Image (tube, rainbow, N blue to C red):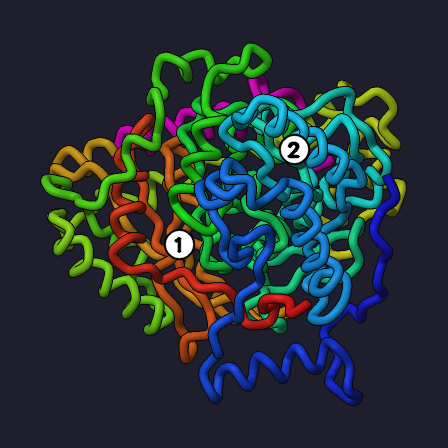
């Protein structure tokens, strides 16, 4: 259970005064901009290509006897050693699971014994954000104040993927306590997590460690959490697919909370199909989370049924009130405009004049700053946490300097979400927001909405002044509606990813998956970053 070594790093990226791995990585990015990035060379493991490997490809090779779970885990561990701990120093992982190979060996033995996979995620190495409880590894929320904190059992979603045969390969870095959508930095792992597409750029937050690790091919798929942006934003910044479900379709049990009434956990993957394969495993009713009471009755038998290549008869609204702002990047808007023709070729009707009446009024006043209440309830269920209250965490000083002011602001929360007046007003406003969105969708006869996941490219690390462009904070979280992001293309001379967000009414995941899959298959925008290429043995 030893943590990976901590590599000291300056508060801001240092200028290149010597030939260091950080400087070399930066030069490689610049070369890619000027000359055009070369395709990644092949990296074979067990007879398959490791780079951009999918779940289906993995299982075909395992059943054919050409690939073992051990070989796959070892291949990812070599990449982590080469690129996360050294080389470009992506800095995405807090802890590599010391039992990953033991788990892989057990799965290999079972496959040899039965000739069958143990479940739909058999042998799949998963990157798990370090705010998911794992009974065999600490869960820190990215905060040194919770170093060594051990939960009594797995989070529901972690248990479900393990039951499905998955291997928890590593716990990933996050914005401390999942506070910010803008960057991935905290006190548990010194320094930022860097965007593998450009090492001087951010990953967004808070699930930036999962996103960076999955896009750099350090694991096959990942789990993240999303209170306002944190699955969809990092996925957009790293050319991934990320699903935020309807509130109540997936369990929050064992996921360290930010605002429990908006928290969602879910998949972050390189393809829509892989996201859906993970989603099939984690969606459903969990007795430990009352909000999921309707999930089994509402969920599809299998969301794989909705991986369809056409969109005949689907009406999609363009949410221009989100997309077309003064600070939106012209290249992002160009990629967004290109999606319309693609969707129409697939058979959809794109309604360009969609409009939500009084949108600014609807989205204001929906807050409930309940972190103090939620984190203290969470810590009450941890057997021996380092601290049990937010006040004790603040007094410990074991919080990153830019995070401490937010911790201190949350100390002002009084009462419970049921008695706090801000929360009571917020719930009423959320209901008005839902009604307003549904009324507009009915008026324009649309089933789903589209807009850029972020209106601006990933910022430079340390830049808090230029426009950020986060479009994920609404409508999805305050309404409880589902939304997902899928790669939309690249900007800045083809170097930085952009994401297309698709949103629908509650329980509309089948339609959103259909739209995302058809768009993905028609465009194939995803490509791996050049800073973490195939390893040559």
Find residue 169 and report its horizontal and vertical position in percent: 68, 42
Residue depicted at x 30% and y 66%: 335
Q: Is residue 407 left or right of residue 242?
A: right
Q: Quadrant of residue 524?
A: bottom left
Find residue 184 and report its horizontal and vertical position in percent: 65, 55
Residue depicted at x 46% and y 19%: 284
Magenta residue span = 409-437
Tell me the CA gap for discs 1 and 2: 39 Å
Q: Total label count? A: 2
Mark 2 neighbour density, 10 Å: few (under 14) some (14–19) many (20 or more): many
Q: Is residue 370 left or right of residue 137?
A: left
- Whether residue 464 is visible, yes or no, is no
Question: Which quadrant of the rendered structure holds the C terminus?
Answer: bottom right
Q: Quadrant of residue 421?
A: top right
Residue depicted at x 31% and y 58%: 323
Which of disc 2 and disc 1 is earlier in sequence?
A: 2
Q: Name the main secondary structure of what is drawn in magenta.
A: helix
Residue 13, compared with residue 196, is above or below; it is below
Residue 294, compared with residue 397, is above or below; it is above
Residue 246 within the magenta-colored segment of the rendering: no
Q: Quadrant of residue 390?
A: top right
Residue depicted at x 44% and y 61%: 469
Q: Nearer the viewer, residue 457 or 370?
A: 457
Residue 391, compared with residue 416, is above or below; it is below
Kindly indicate whether the residue at mark 2 contacts the one at mark 1 (C-beta within 8 angstroms): no
Q: Which residue is mark 1?
A: 453
Which numbered marker is on residue 302?
Answer: none
- Whether residue 211 is visible, yes or no, is yes
Q: Circle 2 — which element?
A: helix
Q: Which residue is mark 2?
A: 108
Find residue 303 and report its horizontal and vertical position in percent: 35, 30
Q: Is residue 338 left or right of residue 136?
A: left
């Amino acid at each position: 259970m030893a943590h990976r070594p901590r590599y000291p790093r300056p508060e801001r990226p240092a200028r290149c005064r010597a030939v260091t791995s950080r400087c070399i990585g930066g030069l490689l990015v610049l070369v890619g901009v000027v000359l055009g990035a070369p395709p990644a060379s092949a990296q074979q493991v067990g007879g398959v290509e490791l780079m951009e490997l999918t779940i289906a490809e993995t299982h075909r090779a395992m059943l054919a006897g050409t690939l073992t779970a051990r070989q796959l885990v070892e291949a990812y561990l070599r990449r982590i050693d080469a690129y996360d701990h050294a080389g470009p120093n992506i800095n995405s992982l807090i802890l590599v699971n010391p039992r990953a190979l033991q788990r892989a060996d057990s799965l290999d033995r079972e496959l040899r014994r039965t000739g069958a996979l143990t479940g739909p995620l058999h042998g799949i190495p998963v990157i798990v954000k370090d705010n998911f409880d794992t009974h065999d590894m600490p869960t820190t929320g990215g905060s040194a104040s919770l170093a060594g904190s051990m939960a009594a059992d797995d989070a529901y979603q972690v248990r479900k993927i393990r039951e499905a045969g998955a291997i928890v390969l590593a716990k990933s870095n996050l914005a401390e306590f999942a506070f910010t959508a803008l960057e991935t930095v905290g006190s548990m792992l010194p320094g930022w997590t860097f965007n593998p597409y450009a090492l001087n750029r951010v990953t967004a937050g808070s699930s930036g460690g999962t996103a960076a690790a999955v896009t750099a091919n350090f694991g096959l798929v990942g789990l993240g959490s999303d209170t306002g942006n944190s699955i969809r934003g990092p996925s957009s910044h790293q050319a991934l697919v990320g699903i935020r479900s309807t509130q109540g379709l997936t369990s929050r049990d064992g996921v360290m909370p930010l605002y429990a009434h908006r928290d969602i956990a879910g998949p972050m993957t390189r393809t829509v199909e892989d996201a859906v394969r993970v989603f099939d495993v984690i969606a459903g009713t969990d007795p430990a989370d009352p909000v999921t009471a309707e999930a089994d009755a509402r969920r599809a038998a299998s969301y794989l049924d909705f991986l369809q290549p056409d969109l005949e008869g689907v009406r999609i609204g363009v949410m221009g009130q989100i997309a077309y702002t003064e600070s939106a990047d012209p290249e992002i808007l160009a990629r967004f405009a290109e999606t319309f023709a693609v969707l129409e070729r697939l058979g959809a009707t794109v309604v360009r004049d969609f409009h939500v009446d009084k949108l600014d009024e609807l989205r204001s006043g929906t807050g409930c700053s309940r972190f103090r209440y939620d984190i203290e309830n969470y810590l009450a269920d941890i057997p021996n946490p380092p601290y049990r209250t937010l006040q004790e965490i603040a007094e410990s000083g074991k919080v990153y300097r830019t995070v401490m002011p937010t911790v201190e602001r949350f100390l002002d929360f009084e009462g419970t979400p049921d008695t706090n007046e801000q929360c009571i007003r917020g719930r009423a406003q959320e209901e008005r927001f839902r009604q307003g969105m549904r009324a507009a969708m009915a008026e324009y006869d649309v089933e789903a909405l589209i807009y850029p996941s972020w209106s601006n490219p990933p910022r430079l690390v340390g830049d808090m002044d230029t426009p950020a462009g986060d479009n994920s904070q609404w409508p999805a979280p305050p309404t409880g509606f589902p939304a997902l992001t899928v790669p939309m293309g690249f900007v800045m001379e083809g170097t930085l990813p952009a994401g297309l967000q698709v949103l629908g009414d509650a329980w509309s995941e089948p339609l959103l998956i259909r739209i995302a899959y058809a768009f993905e298959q028609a465009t194939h925008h995803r490509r791996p970053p050049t800073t973490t290429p195939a390893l040559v043995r």
